[in-house]
Image (cartoon, helix red, strand yellow):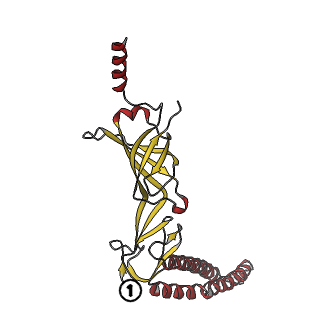
C-alpha cells in the first residue's frame, strides 16, 4: 500500500498545473501606450500649455504653434466671402435681359420686331444665366476656402490624442517641431497593460476573458481584479512560455506604470 501511495504522489507531481487553485506568476504593469505628440504641420512652437507630470484629457489643447500666417489668410478670405456684390450684379443683369426678352417676344408676335433681335436677346439671356451660375460657384469655392483656412488655423493648436500623463517635454517655445521632432510624450495610464509569461502547459486552459488578480509588488499594495485580453499564439522556444496581456482599469492613475507585480489566474473549482 505504501509503495502504491508513493507512486501516486510522484505521478501527481508530474502533471501540468490546473486551476483548482490560483496560480501566481511574475508580471509587469506598463502604460497602454506612449504617444509622441507632433504638430500636424511643421512649425515653430509658440506656447506649451502643460508641464511634465500634468494629467490631460483627450482633445485638450497642450501646445500652440505659430499661427500668424494661417490667421492672416483666414482674415483675407473671410473679408472676400462677406461680399455678394458679384452675384447681385449678375442677378440684376439676368432680370434686365429677361424683361427685354419678354418685351421683344411680344413685339415679334405682333410683327413689330425682327426675329434677329429676339435671337440676340435669347443669347444674351443665356450668357447672363451662365455668368450668374459662375458667380455662385465662385462664392461656393470661396466659402470652402474659408472653411479650409479655419481648419488650418485650428490645426495650429496641438491637442492630446488620448487621456494620460505628460512624461517628457523635449522642446521649448521658439523651437521648430515636426514629424521628426515631437513636442512632448503622453503615457496612457488607463488602462494599464499587464504582461506575463506562462508555461506552455497552461496554454490549453487559458482563454480570453479569464478572470485574474493583479498584485503589485511593494510598496504598492492591494489586489485588483481584471480579465485576460490577449494571448500570444507563438511560443518562446527557449523558455517554453507564452505571453498574455491583461487590461487593468486604472482610473485616476492610482497605480504606477513600469512596476512589477504578481498575477493570479483564477478559475472556479
- Depicted 22 relative to depicted 33: above or below: above
**Residue found farthest to the top:** 1
Q: Which residue is depicted at the point 43% across and 55% down?
A: 218
Asked if residue 234 shows in the view, the reply is: no
Asked if residue 61 shows in the view, the reply is: yes
Q: Position of residue 143 (x, y in %)?
A: 56, 78
Q: Position of residue 224 (x, y in %)?
A: 52, 49
Q: Position of residue 21 (x, y in %)?
A: 47, 33
Q: Nearer the viewer, residue 34 or 122?
A: 34
20 left or right, relative to 109: left
Q: What is the number of callouts on the image? A: 1
- Depicted 259 relative to depicted 110: above or below: above
123 left or right, relative to 51: right
- Depicted 266 relative to depicted 93: above or below: above
Q: Nearer the viewer, residue 190 or 6?
A: 6
**Residue found farthest to the left:** 238
Instruction: Give the secondary structure at mark 1.
Output: loop
Q: Which residue is mark 1?
A: 174
Query: Residue 52: which quarter of the image?
Result: bottom left
Query: Residue 129: which quarter of the image?
Result: bottom right
Q: Quadrant of the N terminus?
A: top left
Q: Position of residue 6 (x, y in %)?
A: 34, 18
Query: Residue 119: which quarter of the image?
Result: bottom right
Crowd class of label 1 (few under 14; some 14 to 19; many from 20; radius 10 Å): few
59 left or right, relative to 122: left
Q: Which residue is depicted at the point 53% across and 32% down?
A: 268
Q: Nearer the viewer, residue 225 or 76?
A: 225
Amino acid at each position: 500500500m505504501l509503495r502504491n501511495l508513493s507512486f501516486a504522489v510522484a505521478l501527481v507531481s508530474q502533471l501540468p498545473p490546473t486551476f483548482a487553485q490560483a496560480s501566481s506568476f511574475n508580471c509587469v504593469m506598463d502604460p497602454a501606450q506612449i504617444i509622441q505628440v507632433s504638430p500636424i504641420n511643421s512649425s515653430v512652437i509658440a506656447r506649451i500649455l502643460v508641464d511634465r507630470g500634468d494629467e490631460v484629457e483627450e482633445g485638450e489643447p497642450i501646445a500652440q504653434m505659430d499661427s500668424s500666417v494661417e490667421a492672416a489668410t483666414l482674415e483675407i478670405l473671410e473679408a472676400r466671402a462677406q461680399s455678394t456684390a458679384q452675384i447681385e450684379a449678375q442677378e440684376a443683369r439676368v432680370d434686365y435681359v429677361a424683361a427685354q426678352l419678354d418685351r421683344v417676344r411680344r413685339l415679334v408676335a405682333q410683327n413689330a420686331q425682327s426675329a434677329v433681335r429676339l435671337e440676340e436677346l435669347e443669347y444674351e439671356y443665356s450668357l447672363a444665366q451662365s455668368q450668374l451660375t459662375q458667380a455662385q460657384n465662385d462664392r461656393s469655392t470661396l466659402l470652402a476656402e474659408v472653411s479650409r483656412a479655419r481648419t488650418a488655423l485650428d490645426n495650429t493648436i496641438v491637442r492630446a490624442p488620448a487621456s494620460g500623463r505628460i512624461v517628457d517635454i523635449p522642446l521649448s517655445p521658439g523651437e521648430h517641431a515636426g514629424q521628426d521632432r515631437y513636442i512632448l510624450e503622453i503615457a496612457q495610464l488607463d488602462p494599464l497593460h499587464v504582461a506575463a509569461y506562462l508555461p506552455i502547459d497552461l496554454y490549453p486552459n487559458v482563454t480570453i476573458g479569464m478572470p485574474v488578480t493583479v498584485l503589485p509588488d511593494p510598496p504598492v499594495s492591494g489586489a485588483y481584479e481584471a480579465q485576460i485580453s490577449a494571448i500570444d499564439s507563438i511560443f518562446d522556444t527557449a523558455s517554453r512560455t507564452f505571453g498574455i496581456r491583461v487590461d487593468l482599469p486604472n482610473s485616476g492613475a492610482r497605480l504606477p506604470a513600469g512596476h512589477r507585480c504578481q498575477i493570479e489566474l483564477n478559475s472556479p473549482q
